[in-house]
Amino acid sequence: MSTHTATARAVPADGFDRALAEAFADPAVVLVHVRAVEYGCFDFEVRRP
């Protein structure tokens, strides 16, 4: 299994659904890590449905 880390970007709260849809439009993306912008700490991950 190979892994790939995509470029991170800040997304406003009202852009979360669109950002996930854009990420999962790529069939190679299996999960997205969501982090707190202020501290960079991991909050949760979203897996492909």
Image (spheres, rainbow, N blue to C red):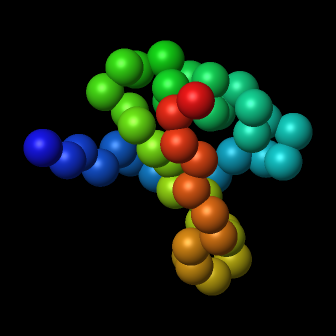
Picture coordinates of residue 9, whole percent (x, y): 54, 49
What residue occupies the far front of the structure in this picture? 49
Dividing the picture into quarters, in which one does residue 40 lie? bottom right
Residue 15 or residue 1, whichever sits in front: 1
Examine the rendered structure and indicate whether residue 34 appears above or below residue 49: below
Residue depicted at x 69% and y 77% = 38
Query: Could one spot residue 38 in this view of the protein?
Result: yes
Examine the rendered structure and indicate whether residue 29 appears above or below residue 44: above
Residue 20 or residue 1, whichever sits in front: 1
Query: Could one spot residue 9 in this view of the protein?
Result: no
Residue 46 is left or right of residue 2, and the answer is right
Dividing the picture into quarters, in which one does residue 22 lie? top right
Residue depicted at x 57% and y 56% = 45
Picture coordinates of residue 4, whole percent (x, y): 23, 45
Residue depicted at x 40% and y 20% = 26
Examine the rendered structure and indicate whether residue 18 appears above or below residue 44: above
Dividing the picture into quarters, in which one does residue 15 lie? top right
Q: Quadrant of the C terminus?
A: top right
What residue occupies the far left of the structure in this picture? 1
Residue 15 or residue 44, whichever sits in front: 44
Picture coordinates of residue 19, whole percent (x, y): 64, 33
Residue 34 is left or right of residue 28, and the answer is right
Q: Quadrant of the N terminus?
A: top left
